[in-house]
Image (tube, grey):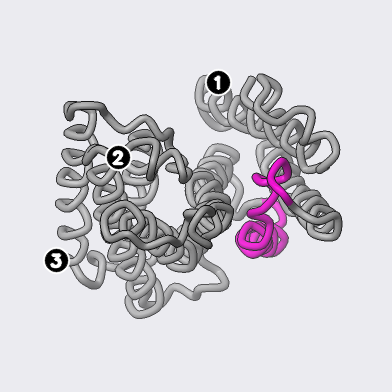
Amino acid sequence: LVMIFFMVMPGLIGGYGNYLFPLLIKAMDLIFPRVNAFSFWILPWSLWFLMMSLMMDSASGTGWTLYPPLSIEGHPTYATDVVLLSLHLSGISSISSSLNFMSTGFEMRGSVKLMASSLFIWSLLVTIFLLILSLPVLAGGVTMNLTDRNTNSVFFKNSSGGNVLMFQHLFWFFGHPEVYVLVAPAFGLVSLASQGLSGKLDIFGYQGMLMALKMIGFIGCVVWAHHMFTASMDDDSRGYFSAATGVIAIPTGMKVFSWLMTLFGKFKGKVTLYSWLFGFIFMFSVGGLSGLILSNASLDIFLHDTYYVVA
């Protein structure tokens, strides 16, 4: 949770986004500076609550997924409540920041045409779309978890007529788009760096890269249940989620090919900078290929929770 919500997201979206987004659209600042400040200053409080949960008696041991019944009957102390509150505050920060970036991109871009703007701008817009779509779903699941713990509701209690799998669906409807929330700004930075280091006026296949980015964002919203192949799921659903997950390899391959073609040719810069770029492309390709194998539901059942997934 610390790595996702308090390192990668604030660094890539809040850090690089706040610095590069206004520059690339020729704006003075984000359209609502105080909302921007609010989205930043709420994060330390959220992190403080998360750290305080570790210092309480019987700290939360639910893992980052917070699955019930482990997060309800399994950990009845207040530490888990504090973790859930921390997630709520982090979500408020992300949504307010996303609305600010979206308003800035559409209202303050001056003479910069959206269809001809930098791919970093588009990567942030796709990220913002995913956050606004998925974070309210996570907030709903977290709130239902809190009410199950404190107000005797039975949303996720199978013994009382609830459905424990519903939380998994709510969580992963947020969790899989969150993967692209984390990696899409990095895509934009790699595209920006590739274009700058190659000395070319534009990245190779700009329109294809733009379409691939949009398709990754769209498909990323409809493949969440591939995280749940080992849970009870009918064969038709497994077939759909396997096929949809495999399709996402096509726009991803387009992006890798365009990066390599952009970097192909005369080097303009230090070898160290190219090493970082090629290192990212190599690591992303190898990790993506292993993930493509896991999209097969039959294989995933055997490889789930093994070192193949993480190593």
**Mark earlier in primary sequence (2, 3):** 3
In this view, the residue in front, 97 or 70, is 70
Per the picture, the main secondary structure of the magenta-coloured stretch is: helix
Which secondary structure, mark 1? helix
The percent position of residue 309, horizontal first and vertical second, equals 67, 27
Q: Which residue is mark 1?
A: 271
Taking the image as shown, residue 111 lies to the left or right of residue 236, namely left
In the rendered view, does 192 fall on the left or right side of 74? Answer: right
Q: Which residue is mark 3?
A: 34
What is the spatial separation of the Cα atoms under label 2 and label 1, in whole angstroms?
54 Å
Residue 185, position in %: x, y?
48, 49
Residue at screen point 41% across, 35% down: 62
Is residue 224 inside the magenta stretch?
A: yes
Image quarter of residue 39: bottom left
Structural crowding at the residue carrying mark 3, measured as other residues with C-alpha within 10 Å and reported as few (<14), some (14–19) or many (≥20): few
Span of residues in magenta: 204-232
Question: In the image, is residue 141 above or below residue 183?
Answer: below
Q: Which mark is residue 188?
A: none
**The stretch drawn in magenta includes residue 308:** no
Element marked by disc 3: helix
Q: Earlier in the sequence, mark 2 or mark 1?
A: 2
Q: Residue at x 34, y 75 (%)?
A: 103
Q: Which one is in front, 154 or 101? A: 154
**Residue 23 visible to an observer of this rendering:** no
- Residue 280 visible within the image: yes
Name which residue type carries label 3. Arg
Which label belongs to residue 76?
2
Describe the element under mark 2 as helix, strand or loop: loop
Q: Amino acid at mark 1?
A: Val
